[in-house]
Amino acid sequence: MMLSLLCLFAAASAMIAFTTSALVGVGLAALRQRLAGLTPTAEARVLLGAALLPMLTCAATMAAALAPSFGWIVDHCVRGLDSHAHPHICVDHHVSALPAPMLVLLAGLIVVRLAMGGARLMHGAVTTALTGRALARVATTAGASGLRVLPLDEPQAFVVGVLRPMLFVTRGLVSDAHREHLTAVVAHEHSHLRRRDPLRRAVATLALAFHLPGLAGWLDRRLARAHELAADADAAHELGSRTLVARALVRLTRAHLQAPRMALAFAESDVEARVAALLDNRPRHDQPHRLVLLAGLGTLFIVVGSSADTVHHGVEIVLGLLGG
Amino acid sequence: MPKPPPSLPALGELELALLEHLWRTGESDVTLAHTAIGKRRGITLNTIGSTLERLFKKGLVARTKVSHAYRYVPRMGRDEFAARRVLTAAGGMQSLAQTGLLSAFVDLVADVDDAALDRLEALIADKRGSDKRGSDKRSSDKRGSDKRGSDNRSSDKRGSDNRSSDKRGSDNRGLDKRGSA
C-alpha cells in the first residue's frame, strides 16, 4: 500500500513539476527581450527564481494535496462527494493496486532525476570541500592581502567550495607579468564570495531536477553566465572601470589558451559575451527586487494552502486522467 | 623548456621515489639515481633507466645528453606537483567547474581563438579611447565653465569695487550661476 501511495505521490510531483517547468520555459521565452534589459544581478535573480519555481510549486501543491493524510482537511471521498473513480493520494484509502504504467513512468522519471541531481550535488560538494582544504595546505599566503597563492604558473583565480568557499589565485597571476590584472580578478572573485554564488549554484543544481531535461540544461548555463556577468559588473563598479575588467579577461584568456590543455573545449565560450556586456553601458533595470520575488512565493503558498481541498481533489482527478 | 602537463598522469611508487630524488638533488643521471634509490631496493640500473624514461615521456622530467648519458631534471617543483596532484585527484579544474561549484575567472573551456581575442582587445581600446575623449571633453568643458566663472567672479569683484556699475555686477552673478550649473 505504502509503495503505491509513494508511487502516486512521485507521479503527482512529476506532473506538477514538469507542467510548471513548461510554463516557466514559455514565460522565459516570452520575456526574453525584458531579460536582456536587466542588470546581470537582476537577471541572475530572475533565473534563480525560475530554476526554483517548479520545486517550490511542487512542494506547496503536494503539501496541500496531502492535507487529508495529515488531518488538516477531511477528504472529499470520505464526505461522499465523489465516485472514487480516480487514484487516491491519502492514507485513509487503503490502496494496494500498482498505479497505471503512465504514472509509474512519471514517478520513475522524477525519482531518477532527483537521485542524479542529489548525487551530483553531494559528490560536487564533498569533492570541492576536500579539494579546497587540500589546496589550502599547499598554498602560501601573500603578504598583507591574505590571498591564498597556489604554486602554479598559469594565471588563474577561482573560488571553490559551497558552504565555506575559498578564493585561490595562482603564482602566475601574482607575477609581474599579470600583476596589473590582479585587482580586477580579485574584485570579481570577491563578488562571487559576497553573493554566495557557489551556494546558489548548489541549490539550483537540486532544483533543476524538477525541470524538463532540456530546459534544465539551458537554465543551468544561463545562470552560470549570469553569475559571471554579475561578478564582472560588481568588479567594474568597485574599480570604477569596465574596460579594466574586460582587458583583464581578454589578456588572461589569451594566456590561458597558450598554456597546455588536457581536454578539448566543447562548450561555447562566454568570453565574448562577458566582454560585450562590460563594454555595453546602456542603462539597465535592477528589477524585480528580491522582496517582490519572495512576496510572489509567499502568495503562491497562501493561495495553494487556502485551497487545499480543491488542490487535493484536482491532483487526484488529473492523476486519474493520466492513468487512463 | 616546455611546460609540464596541467593534470598529472598516474604515477607508480618508484616513479614518485625518483621524482623525490630529483627534487632533493636538483638533477641526476641514471647511475646516481640507481645508487640513491635502486641499490637499496635491489632494483637494476635498467629498471631505473626505463622508469626515468617513462617520467620523461609523461612530461614530468626534462633531460639533456651529457657525453653518452642523459641528465634528468624535474619540470616542476615539489609544491607545484602537490597542488596539481590535488586538482588531478578532484578530476581537474574543468571537471570541478562543470559541477558549478568551482568558478574560475578565466573560462576553463574557452573556445576562442587569437583572432577573436584580437578583435575584443581592439573593441576595448576603442571604448577606452571614446571614454577618454568623453572625459577630456567633460574636463575641458568644466575648465571652460570654471574659467568663465572665475572671469565672472573677477568682473563681479570689479563691479562691486566700482560702486558705479552695480548692474554689470548683477549680470555677472547671473553668468556665474550658469557657469556653476
Image (cartoon, coloured by chain):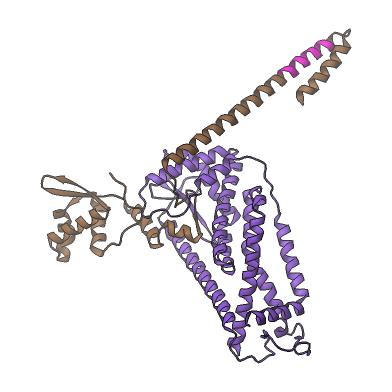
Task: Quadrant for the N terminus of chain A, please.
Answer: bottom right
Give the side of residue A255 with respect to residue A236, left or right: left
In magenta segment, residue B152:
yes
The stretch of residues the image draws in magenta is B147-160
The residue depicted at 43 percent of the width and 39 percent of the height is: B115
The percent position of residue A275, horizontal first and vertical second, equals 53, 42
Kindly give the residue lying farthest to the left in the view shown: B68
Could you say which chain is coloured brown in the image?
A: B
User: Residue at 54% across / 66% down in the picture?
Assistant: A213
Q: Which chain is purple?
A: A
Residue drawn at (60%, 54%), measured in percent from left and top? A195
Q: Is residue B153 above or below residue A296?
A: above
Question: Magenta span: helix, strand or loop, mainly?
Answer: helix
User: In the rendered structure, does residue A247 fall within the stretch colored magenta?
Assistant: no
Question: In the drawing, does residue A236 fall left or right of residue B64?
Answer: right
- Residue B71 in picture, x, y percent from top left: 18, 48
Q: Quadrant of residue B128?
A: top right
Instruction: Please state which of residues B171 and B74 is positioned toward the viewer in this rendering.
Output: B171
